[in-house]
Image (spheres, grey):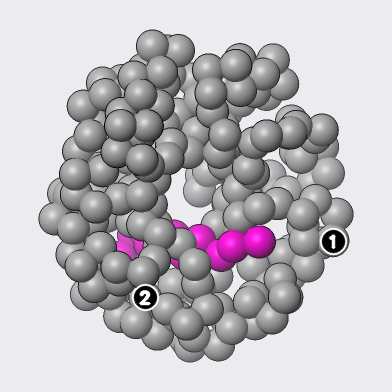
Amino acid sequence: MKIQLALDRLTKEQCFDIVRQTSDYIDWIEVGTGVIKEHGMSIVRKMREAYPQKTIVADMKTCDAGKYEAMQAFEAGADITTIMAFSSDKTIQDALDIAKRFNKRIMIDLLGVKDKKRIQELKALGVDLVSLHIGKDMQETISFEKDRFQLVEGLSGIEIAVAGGLDLKNIPMIIKNNRPNILIVGSAITKAERPNEIASKIKELIQ
């Protein structure tokens, strides 16, 4: 099980300071959508240069121009980029083809997906990594209840990441009941007074 640190709604300086404090405890560094929108691909490049040993995720949330945006992310140094599950099959397939060319990966964001049929369609396309995601705006009314995981229950050959409001209160339950492959943690770490301490505690939980 890996920890993906989600960097969003932060300045460039804050991003690098938080990664510096937590790098011993995290596995994947996610450059969030808002950060990319503000700073462009240059921050992905700089994060790659600063942390060559880490897996870099560019959270592009692509929903069109899959070939072009995937190439943007990989040429900037990302190992993984994200595509929305509601994108056309053509968009997803184009991105998967580019990922194969670069020997990189695509993570499909399941935000808004409610039908397990779509997961099967994604698997048929060759998708092997998805994010079970509750968006920021919905976190006040939705949590990771058991029925949310039914969307990916019984899947084989696909790695599962979970994202959206994860913290020290709900992570133990998620680990015990669902055993995802990747925990995507944002504000619980980035908004903490001592990010390194929270990241360390999460690392202890998964070990």
> Is residue 168 at least partly visible in the picture?
yes
In the image, is 148 to the left or to the right of 11?
A: right
Residue 109, placed above or below residue 183: above
- Residue 189 lies in magenta, yes or no? no
Q: Estimate the spatial distance between the alpha carbons at disc 2 and disc 1, rounded to whole Å.
A: 27 Å
Give neighbour class at mark 1: few <14, some 14-19, many 20+ (Cα, 10 Å). Answer: few
x then y, percent, for residue 142: 68, 44
x then y, percent, for residue 41: 17, 49
Q: Main secondary structure of the magenta part?
A: strand
Q: Residue sitting at 36 percent across and 40 percent down? A: 103
Quarter of the C terminus within the rendering: bottom right
x then y, percent, for residue 68: 21, 27
Taking depth in this image into account, of 73 and 196 the one nearest to the observer is 73
Q: Secondary structure beneath disc 1? A: helix
Quarter of the N terminus within the rendering: bottom right
> Counting residues from the N terminus, which is met first, the one under dot 2 or under dot 1?
2
Residue 196, placed above or below residue 4: below
In the image, is 57 to the left or to the right of 12?
A: right
The disc labelled 1 sits on which kind of residue? Lys
In the image, is 12 to the left or to the right of 105?
A: left
Q: Residue sitting at 67 percent across and 18 percent down? A: 120
Q: Which residue is mark 1?
A: 176
Region of the chain picked out in magenta, as a range: 1-10
Q: Secondary structure beneath disc 2? A: helix
Looking at the rendered structure, the number of numbered marks drawn on it comes to 2
Q: Which residue is mark 2?
A: 19
Q: Residue sitting at 84 percent across and 61 percent down? A: 176
Q: Residue sitting at 40 percent across and 26 percent down? A: 96
- Residue 9 lies in magenta, yes or no? yes
